[in-house]
Image (cartoon, rainbow, N blue to C red):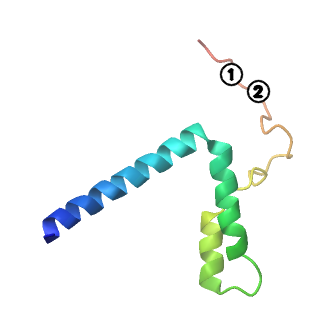
Amino acid sequence: MDAGLLAQYAVIAVAVLVSAWFVAKKQFPNAVRRLRIAIAIPLVRDGRAAWLQKIGRWVAPASALSDGSCGGCNSCGPSTPRRH
C-alpha cells in the first residue's frame, strides 16, 4: 500500500468518525453525556497525573449549574414568544 492510498484511508476514517460523533450528539445527547461522564470520572480522581486530570476536565461535559443562575429552570427573565 503506497502512502497516498494510506493518507486517503486516514482522511476518510477521520471524516466518518467526526460524522458519527456529530450524529450521536444530535440524536442521542443523554447517552453522549453519560459516556463523557463515564470516561472523565476515572481521569479526574485524586492521585492521577496532572495531565490526565486536565484531559478528564476537558472530556467532561459542562455543568448545567455553571451559568450563574439560581439553579432552577434556567429561564430567568422575560423571553420573547416564538413565532411559528
Residues tagged 2 and 1 counted as in contact (Cβ below 8 A): yes
Disc 2 from disc 1: Cα separation: 7 Å
Q: Is residue 6 above or below residue 64?
A: below
Q: What amino acid type is highlighted by mark number 1? A: Thr
SS state under label 1: loop
Determine the image quadrant of residue 83.
top right
Rendering coords of residue 40 (x, y %): 67, 67
Identify the amino acid type marked 2: Pro
| SS under mark 2 | loop
Q: Position of residue 56 (x, y in %)?
A: 64, 71
Q: Residue at x 59, y 12 (%)?
A: 84
Q: Quadrant of the N terminus?
A: bottom left
Nearer to me, 5 or 23 = 5
* Residue drawn at (59%, 73%) of the image: 55
Seen at 59% across and 82% down, the residue is: 51
Q: Residues within 10 Å of mark 2 (few under 14, many from 20)?
A: few
Q: Which mark is residue 67?
A: none
Mark drawn on residue 80? 1
Front-most of residues 48 and 2: 2
Q: Tag on residue 78?
A: 2
